[in-house]
Amino acid sequence: MVEHLRTYGQIAWLWIRAAWQYPTSFVLLAVGNGLITGLDFVGLWIMFTHLRDLAGFSLSEVALLYGSASLALACADTAIGSVERIGTYIRTGRLDQMMTKPVPLLVQVCADQFTLRRLGRLTQAAVVFAWACTYVDWTPLRVLVAVSMLCSGALVFFGLFVGFSCIQFWTTDATEFANAFTYGGATVTQYPLTVFPREMMVGLTFVVPVAFVNWYPCLYLLGRSDPWGMPSALQFSSPLAGLLTMAAALLVWRSGVRHYTSTGS
Amino acid sequence: MLHVAIATRAFRRYSTYRAATLAGIFTNSVFGIIYSYAYIALWDANPTAGGYDQQDAVTYVWLGQALLMTIALWGGGTTDDLAERVRTGDIAIDLYRPVGLVGWYLASDLGRAAYHLLTRGFAPTLIGLVVFDIALPSSAVNAVGFAVSLVLAVVVSFAVRFLVASTAFWLLDQSGVKVMSGAFAIFFSGMMLPLVLFPGWLGTLANALPWASYVQVPADIWLGKHTGTGLVVALGFQVLWAVVLLGACHGVLRLATRKVVVQGG
């Protein structure tokens, strides 16, 4: 495991140096990515100039939801964002090359074209999260839940990205299908779930478990009872959801790799 | 005639990827649903925000999803080919062709836009109509106005993307500028949040920038917010930006060809 992480680091470092060959683009990419998410939050803020609360949640509460989910997403995306490109690797035959190397395929795919451009998003998310944290009434248990929320959130996104990218083992064309679940899931986490109908909330808990990324733990941090009357045990279940999502994703990945037949050229 | 031929070929080229189109429609629809519920919550809390009512707001969401690919909001489209050809040096061949480069790429981008409109424009609109009962244009004049406005939106967006791609002449790689420009496009086009909600000077600024002609202007025409001379002014705004930006494209191209360095040549 440690050895794989070391290999991952080496490949990632290689790509950082490669990206630096175009320094202007490198800087603009980082700034641009921070800007996209930064403006995202400005959008939420503008929404609140017309509102006192959104479906029962104030700006600082929505900021906590937004910041925590964005941080988790940014971590997952920086670490394994390249897995989305697996269709390209299959089409161009690069996956075949990777399979001949003595490093696990997933490590190679994730580290490939590693980019630090997501640092912009990470910074921005951290700022929003820190601001929202000043409104939380902290207790030791809440600190623990907050830390576990960020780690489990990253795991859930990790699982979603890896799992849904595996679609590309079966079809190299329909890559955008995955975006509905990965980026769609990320978008959902910007809003309090009370915005959506009950059926959607159930789906976001048990099918695409993004509710565990921020919704349930944040309810605990904010000291609010569940507006849907879901069991309060769910507010502590994020680590479990994270591990389950990741395990499911790794299983899908394995069966995807088994199913893989080279493009043959 | 030549340009019609170019546009038809581009249309066919994009229509090869059927599964990708279906996946894209699915994803657009998922995002449409997410944003619809968010806006319903917003307009529930403030039923007259920005001078829209709830149906206007939900219609706006689905129009945005329909326009997303048609105007290539994220960048991409045929201008990506241009940037790639600059990077590889193939642009040298394009430059000694007896056809204007801007006209060539504009024609092919219009062909692409036509394909994306017929598939990824119509399908989500239909879903919005069935599921969320969105509004249709109130009069024939508005419907025709919308069609004209849509073409102008593609032209303005093309010109912006062409300028972005042209930075490759100097930077060799457009990706950084492309991400930056995409961030601005999402925010200032009204894709993220209708510009009618932007407060004070920010609203004035956003409504004057070229990006307003991407989503806000066509959507307002569809919704019947511009009638009579207002409609002429709205279309005139788009024409103005189209002319200015296409002029800039020609200018930049002239500068660029003077210093073109063919890598590896």
Image (tube, coloured by chain):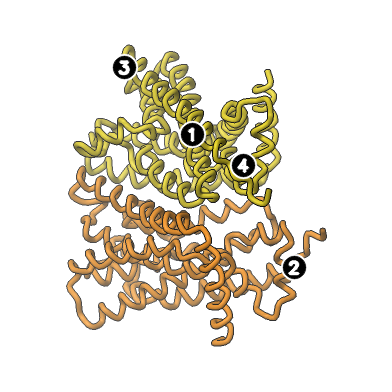
Mark nearest the camera among 3 and 1 is 1
Q: Quadrant of residue A152?
A: bottom left
Residue that appears at 50% across and 65% down: A115
Q: Earlier in the sequence, mark 4 or mark 1?
A: 4
Residue that appears at 42% across and 54% down: A28
**How far across and how far down the image is residue B201, in percent?**
20, 37
- Chain for disc number 4: B
- Chain for disc number 3: B
Tag shown at residue B252 = 1
Instruction: Give the residue at mark 3.
Output: B230
Marks 4 and 3 sit apart, C-alpha to C-alpha, by 37 Å
Instruction: Please name the color used to draw chain B.
Output: yellow
* Local secondary structure at mark 3: helix
Marks 1 and 2 sit apart, C-alpha to C-alpha, by 42 Å
Marks 3 and 2 sit apart, C-alpha to C-alpha, by 59 Å
Query: Which quarter of the image is occupied by the C terminus of chain A?
Result: bottom right
Marks 3 and 1 sit apart, C-alpha to C-alpha, by 33 Å
Viewer-nearest residue: B210 or A258: B210
Same chain check for tags 2 and 4: no
Instruction: Please name the color used to draw chain A.
Output: orange
**How far across and how far down the image is residue A42, in percent?**
28, 50
The furthest residue to the bottom: A2
Marks 4 and 1 sit apart, C-alpha to C-alpha, by 17 Å
* Local secondary structure at mark 2: helix
Tag shown at residue A96 = 2
